[in-house]
């Protein structure tokens, strides 16, 4: 069995090995956005009710008072695998927002350096859930997940450098509170951290708030922990 699927700027190739295991290769994966790929692994050795659906979906995870972007690697009716930069341990409760309207909660049952497995508190119908998420994403006005943040950051525009408040951030943009002088159409540089500077454009500005669209899509790992920003 061989698979090649493409979504936006992400390509995944899969091949069934001689022992029946599935192996995957990724290309330009870090900047792929919502619902990058979806594969159903229907290997006959899977236990009933344990079938995994590979989704590689961007999600927002909450644990230990922190939040950050993560990837749901696969999902079943009873659990999911999460790739996350949050600090979690076996036994921790983690909430995973698959969209602004859909959240799942589970307990960490295993953990590696950057992945963990969650046993869901309440079983789900994973097929119906993925179908619902697709419909949400296609709906008019659908928005990307954002991290709610309240911190001072330095921006640079044609007006010079100034300090503003960062209110939220996504892979594609941010909302800031400013002194009222920013105008739509201005180019802007937002220094989120000393290591993370985002170039972009002011898309709108109203009543001391502004929306910024970034030139480059931020990776999931860039936004893996709100506390680290």
Image: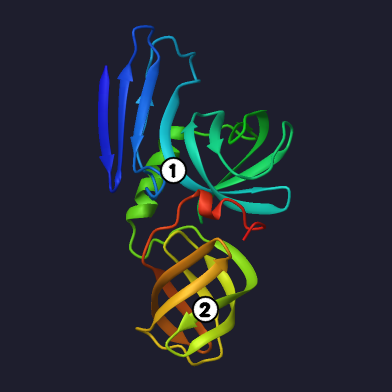
Residue 41 is at least partly visible in this image: no
Residue at 73% x, 37% y is 92
Q: Nearer the viewer, residue 38 or 224?
A: 224
**Residue 155 disc label:** 2
Q: Residue at x 36, y 47 (%)?
A: 134
Indicate the position of residue 187 as horizontal and vertical percent values: 38, 80
Question: Quick one: quadrant of the C terminus?
Answer: bottom right
Res 167 quadrant in image = bottom right
* Viewer-proximal residue among 58 and 27: 27
Q: Residue furthest top?
A: 19
Asked if marks 1 and 2 touch (Cβ < 8 Å), the reply is no
Please determine whether, in this image, residue 192 is positioned above or below residue 34: below
Q: Kindly identify which residue carries mark 1.
A: 57
Does residue 68 appear to the left or right of 13 in the view shown? right
223 shown above or below 152: above
Count neighbours of disc 2 (C-alpha within 10 A) and say few if under 14, some if 14 to 19, many if 20 or more.
many
Q: Is residue 164 above or below residue 194?
A: below
Q: Is 90 located above or below residue 195 in the figure?
A: above
Q: Residue at x 65, y 57 (%)?
A: 228
Relative image position of residue 171 (x, y in whole percent): 45, 59
Coloring scheme of the render? rainbow
Q: Is residue 199 left or right of residue 146?
A: left
Q: Residue at x 58, y 65 (%)?
A: 194
Report how far apart the C-alphas of labels 1 and 2 lie in the structure.
31 Å
């Amino acid at each position: 069995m061989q698979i090649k699927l493409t979504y936006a700027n992400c390509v995944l190739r899969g091949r069934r090995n001689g022992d029946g295991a599935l192996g995957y290769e990724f290309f330009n994966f870090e900047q792929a956005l919502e619902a990058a790929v979806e594969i159903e692994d229907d290997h006959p050795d899977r236990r009933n009710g344990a079938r995994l659906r590979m989704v590689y979906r961007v999600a927002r995870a909450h644990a230990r008072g922190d939040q950050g972007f993560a990837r749901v690697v696969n999902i079943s009716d009873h659990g999911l695998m999460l790739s996350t930069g949050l600090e979690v341990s076996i036994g921790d409760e983690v909430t995973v927002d698959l969209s602004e309207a859909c959240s799942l909660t589970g307990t960490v049952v295993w953990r590696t350096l950057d992945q963990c497995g969650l046993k869901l508190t309440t079983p789900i119908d994973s097929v119906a859930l993925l179908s619902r998420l697709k419909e949400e994403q296609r709906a008019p006005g659908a928005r990307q997940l954002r991290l709610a943040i309240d911190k001072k950051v330095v921006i640079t525009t044609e007006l010079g450098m100034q300090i503003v408040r960062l209110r939220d951030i996504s892979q594609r943009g941010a909302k800031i509170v400013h002194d009222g002088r920013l105008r739509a159409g201005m180019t802007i540089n937002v220094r989120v951290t000393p290591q993370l500077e985002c170039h972009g454009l002011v898309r709108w500005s109203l009543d001391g708030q502004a929306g910024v669209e970034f030139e480059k899509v931020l990776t999931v790992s860039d936004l893996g922990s709100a506390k680290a920003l």
